[in-house]
Amino acid sequence: MPSQKLPPTGETPSPATGLVQESAQQIWLAGLGAFAKAQEEGSKVFQGLVKEGLDLQRQTKAAAEEKLAEASAKAAQPWDKLESIFEERVAKALKHLGVPSLAEFEALQAEVAALKKQVATLKAGTKAAKLVKPVKKITRT
């Protein structure tokens, strides 16, 4: 690269050199102004980005929770079916072993309660019969 020759000291710079220096000075000042503006507005931009980030986080969290709820609902269906099959098979095995079902047990309880009531009624009738002395029949001869 050939070196540029500067005008010797004491010589006046050419008008083109003055324009270049003035242009360079303006570019330098514009750069300083842009830097100052970026520092000044940097915190505003940062706060705006934080706000947008929070909004995006809320949206993605809501979408993720919705997808999780859908997946949970779909996963619960096979478990419900499996539980139903299991209960049916256990009931069938218990019936095969002679163990009464809940409905049969409840019917038996109702029947025992009815029999207790009948026994109590009969006992009350027997006590009443004992209290009443039998009337002797008078026979006429």
Image: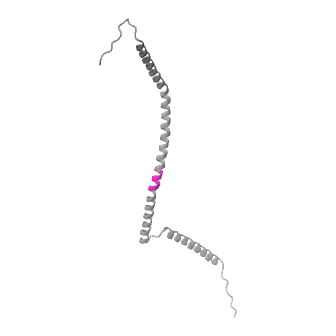
Q: Which residues are magenta?
A: 69-75
Seen at 47% across and 21% down, the residue is 33
56 or 71, nearer to the observer: 56
- Most extreme residue toward the right, as rendered? 140
- Most extreme residue toward the top, as rendered? 10
Please check the rendered image and state whether residue 2 is part of the magenta-colored stretch, yes or no.
Answer: no
Please check the rendered image and state whether residue 71 is part of the magenta-colored stretch, yes or no.
Answer: yes
Where residue 93 appears, as percent x and y from the top left, is 41, 69
64 or 11, nearer to the observer: 11
| Quarter of the rendering occupied by the C terminus | bottom right
The quarter of the displayed image where residue 10 is located: top left
Seen at 43% across and 64% down, the residue is 85
Name the magenta segment's main secondary structure: helix
- Most extreme residue toward the bottom, as rendered? 141
Seen at 51% across and 69% down, the residue is 103
Q: Is residue 112 left or right of residue 19?
A: right
Q: Is residue 80 left or right of residue 2?
A: right
Where residue 128 appears, as percent x and y from the top left, is 64, 76
Seen at 46% across and 60% down, the residue is 80
Relative to residue 100, is residue 56 depicted above or below? above
53 or 98, nearer to the observer: 53
74 or 104, nearer to the observer: 74
Relative to residue 11, is residue 137 depicted above or below? below
| Quarter of the rendering occupied by the N terminus | top left
The quarter of the displayed image where residue 87 is located: bottom left
